[in-house]
Amino acid sequence: MKKVKSLYPALMVVIMYVAIMVLKEVRILNGYYIQVLMFAGINVMMTASLNLVNGFTGQYCIGHAGFMSLGAYGAAVVTTLIFGGKSGVPLLLQTPVFLLGLFVGGCCAALVGALIGIPSLKLKGDYLAIVTLAFGEIVRALLRLIQPIGGARGMIGIPNYANIGWILFFVALTLYLLRNLIYSPFGRAFVAIRDNEIAADAMGINTTKYKIMSFCIAAFIAGVAGGLYAHVLSFIQPDSFSIAKSNDFLVYLYAGGAGSLTGSIVGAVLLTVIPEVLRFLADWRLAVYAVVLVIVMLYRSEGLCGGYELPFLKITRGSLYGIEEPKKKLSFKKKKDA
Amino acid sequence: MSLLEVKNLSIMFGGLCAVDDFNLNVEKGELIAVIGPNGAGKTTVFNMLTGIYRPTTGSIKMEGKDMIGLKPYEFAQNGITRTFQNIRLFSGASVADNVKMAATMHNKQNLMNCILRTKGMVQSERELDEKVMSLLERLGLADKADFLAKNLPYGDQRRLEIARALMTDPKVLLLDEPVAGMITTELEEMAQLVAQIRKDFDLSIIMIEHHMNFVMPIADRIKVLDFGKTIAEGTPAEVQANPRVIEAYLGGGYKNVDA
């Protein structure tokens, strides 16, 4: 019974995939809707990774789109320039090449994350915010200058390997691994740093090491998300990853609730879908979007799901003893015997 | 060789000499109290002993190892842990998690095991949880293990700070005003608790405290600071009789209190 229960989330993902496929077959969902859903998924990955740094480790990264662009370009270079796109590789090898591209994209982002994280995270305070703000713009400026990857014109002809199945898979994988990380000694160290850096230091936690670790993991996930983005859209340009994009992720994060993975899902999905649903309002769309945000912040300043976590996105103390809800320790043992 | 040897410790903040020539040898299992009026430099001494401030001159040796220049977390990893005068808990985390966070440096599971949540990792989590719960039980916090730290009453927060510090497996525990803001009955409970953990964990304790009724019965030795200088040192009885201490700190009316 316990084994079966732990498979529910995976089952949900499969059901979601099947549902989307069926809706697509009966023409309720057209290609455009599917693409919106794919972007929603990518935004969930971006927001969840940003959550690791801003929500769980208490640092402040405001140039997350920079990592996304590194991942997008890294992955696109591998699949398009090195392996020559769809025509360059046999059908059977397309998936491995795609995955390799995503991995390379993630690694590019993580490496650069380490490069800027190591000097700026040694300091206590908001230095990371300034550095990442500058970083996002520097990456964009540099990408515009590199001609082999298209410069300011952008890169075209990227094979559209990513479909809704892949996106669902990567979103689920990201959330699963992030959940495990957050409810592990590493995640506890992150939260300790967020809640009180001086005390964390005094309790033997190497704060610099854990901050850099959290930042690099987040950069890696952002890189993979960027890689997916490139392979959904088939076209990327440096200006798609501007400060405005970084701001979007911050809005998703804080509207959904920082420090809650559920919040990252809700924030990213709602705020990706709402502007699309509101398209009939034409120019009034952005005003309504802004009003929605203001209302959320007025009535739930901690975010829509701040402080709340779906059961399968958290690991309680009780689950260590095989039961769902945390009770007093003694009752664990009784239940275990019974 | 003493467990902790502190020699000629001084620190200057600009032109101000906050602590001047502080010497202290701590033997295993000893309980030393540091007293003195406000601004005497007691907490500054603690900040130097835990690596938050780097002393201008002097040496700190823990089990013979030179500690000057190490980071605060390295002090903790070498067995010197503290509690804070103004409580610094991980307020957004549960009581159990607060204590588990202090066990981070003992974690043997690598990142891969953790993100994949392997069997070995779950097993070590369970062992950690059992260890944490037995520690919380000793400190009377077991039934509040799943409360958020910030929702605990004040006295429990102080006890949680001690539980958290104990989880790092310290050899020397520094308590910065453990009974600040507590009422008389709580004072007695805390005195028992300090004596108990000192015995159970085979700890050396250095304690800053203002409540003389709390300090006198449990301390082996007392050091008295005033304006950064050590003005007296000795057993509680000796210190109480010292005219300089009476003048600087205790005041004339103190004689009546039984020690």
Image: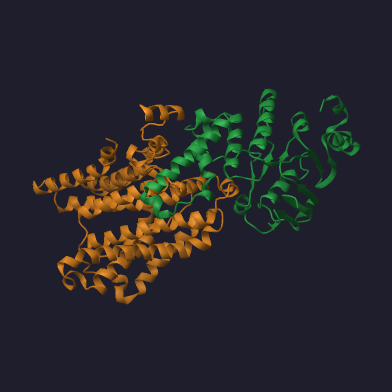
What hue does chain A carry in this figure?
orange
Could you tell me residue B11's position as x and y percent? 76, 54
Could you tell me residue A150's position as x and y percent? 29, 73
The C terminus of chain B - image quarter: top right
Relative vertical location of residue A60 with respect to residue B92 in this rendering, above or below: below
Relative vertical location of residue B92 with respect to residue B117 in this rendering, above or below: above
Residue found farthest to the front:
A337
Number of marks present in the image shown: 0
Q: Residue at the spot x=79%, y=56% of the render? A: B15
Most foreground residue, A277 or A169: A169
Could you tell me residue A243's position as x and y percent? 39, 58
Residue found farthest to the left:
A26
Could you tell me residue A118's position as x and y percent? 50, 62
Question: Is A186 displayed left or right of A179 in the figure?
Answer: right
Residue A90: name its quadrant.
Answer: bottom left
Relative vertical location of residue A308 with respect to residue A115 in this rendering, above or below: above
How was the colour assigned to the protein in this rendering?
by chain
Q: Residue at the spot x=30%, y=48% of the render? A: A286
Residue B222: name its quadrant.
Answer: top right
Q: Residue at the spot x=76%, y=42% of the render? A: B39
Q: Residue at the spot x=71%, y=56% of the render? A: B64
Res. A126 in view: yes
Residue B215: name its quadrant.
Answer: top right
Most foreground residue, A13 or A281: A13
Res. B88 in view: no
What hue does chain B carry in this figure?
green
Question: Is A200 displayed left or right of B174 in the figure?
Answer: left
Relative vertical location of residue A71 with respect to residue B201 in this rendering, above or below: below
Residue found farthest to the top:
B185
Residue found farthest to the right:
B243
